Amino acid sequence: MNFLNEAANRYPTAISFASGRPAESFFSLERWLSAVPLFIDHMARENGFSVALAEKRLAQYGPTAGIIEALIAEQLRIDERIECEPERIIVTAGCQEALSLLIPALCRAPGDVILARNPTYIGATGVADFAGIEIVPVEPLAGEDWAHTLTRLAQELRRAGKTPRGLYLTPEFDNPTGTVLSELERRSIIAGCAEHRIVVLEDNPYGMFRFEGAATPAMAALDDVGCVVYLATYSKTLCPAVRVGAAVVPKRLFGSVGEADRLLAELGERKSFVTVNTSQVTQAIVGGVLLKQQCSLGTVIEGPRLHYRRNRDALLRALDLAFGAGHEGVAWNRPEGGFFLSLSLPFEFGRDETAACAREQGVIVMPMTFFTLDETHRKEVRLAFSNTDEGEIEAGVARLARYVDTQSSLVQ
Ligand SMILES: Cc1ncc(COP(=O)(O)O)c(C=O)c1O
């Protein structure tokens, strides 16, 4: 991120496809803040407090697990079709805190490792790195289903004295690739993880931003064995500044109520030494908006969803125009939602190429190697289309095409 910020500062007129930030034009802080009194009234009613006391309590330290779990549970039920009890939810400072609590909680013994797809979101792998926990890439071989992949890998790891404890995934509109795991794949992952007692960390910041096609059930909704911890966030549906997310622990972990309760308790204990509790002021913002919206964010995200869809369409049109014919080695996917698309190029694209592309053509893209766990995917880049507009996308892809043409002619 520092490297990309530096590039953006150094070439301020460059068009950037690097940042996967939500579109700022839809932030509505004043409106969201105006929902806070709704939450304070609700808190007063729920606890039998006066409104004045509820306001004081809001400004005080609060319960580690949070104060909006019931509203979150209802929103997950309506918007994501996930059934969970509020008691299974711990409200966190964004999904990032949930990851930094969960990954070390799962990997406590030497040799415990986390599995992740490759490439993967660096927020998850960064947590493991800093905790000294090994991250092992996992991807099925051609023709192999996920359950077999997980068995093969678990056996290999055990032979090396290692134990896979968790599998981090973004099944819906993955960051960085923009891809989706099918229901069949999700079920196969659950079967493999259940067999080898691997906890799935299902991260879903982009699931509500589907542009077309039928939604695939969340893994937490398919989980009949109790191996999926669901990670929610309001960073993309409202705004990142609230720093409100949640971890939802299943009622049973691999069939055991005790094991699930122990994990939940451990997360609470760890959190109490990290952030004590998630800011109650920003929980009140999220809670107030949820109350105002009858616990569904469908209408709140409609504007941004259409914006992201227009941008995705503009990006696909621009790519078709620039690379549609006669560009061997250039290919891209067509994401049905989310913020990201991955583009393959006929040459390697790393740090030097990012800098050269920004300097020579005025466009910044993100090398896929920033997300990889090994030396693969060296000829791919991630294009984020969330916090930009159609005009920039058109101009940016034309600039990128000029860089690709110049490089391809040098390579030949
Ligand atoms: C896959 C993924 N998970 C989590 C996050 C961060 O979530 P939060 O802002 O809730 O910490 C992001 C943000 O870019 C993301 O792409």
Image (cartoon, helix red, strand yellow):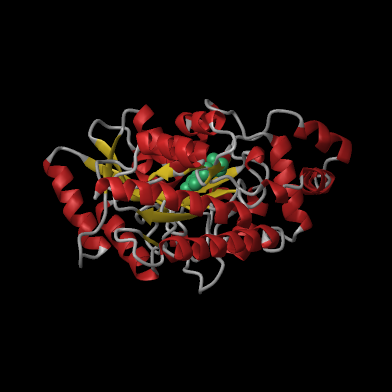
Identified at 65% across, 52% down, the residue is 70
Which residue: 62% across, 38% down?
A: 243
Please indicate, yes or no, whether residue 92 appears anywhere in the rendered image: no
Please determine whether, in this image, residue 109 is positioned above or below residue 393: above
Marks counted in the figure total: 0
Q: Is residue 324 above or below residue 105?
A: below
Q: Residue furthest top?
A: 273
Q: Quadrant of residue 157?
A: top left
Would residue 60 be found to the left or right of residue 162 on screen? right
In the figure, 75 relative to 137: above or below?
Answer: below
Percent from the top left, x then y, of residue 191? 30, 62
Give how far across and how far down residue 71 sits, in percent.
67, 53
Picture coordinates of residue 165, whole percent (x, y): 30, 44
Which of the pair 197/22 is nearer the observer?
22
Q: Residue at x 38, y 27 (%)?
A: 130
Q: Would you identify the image quadrant in which residue 77 lies?
A: bottom right
| Furthest residue in direction left, as rendered | 159
| Residue 381 x/y as whole percent | 39, 48
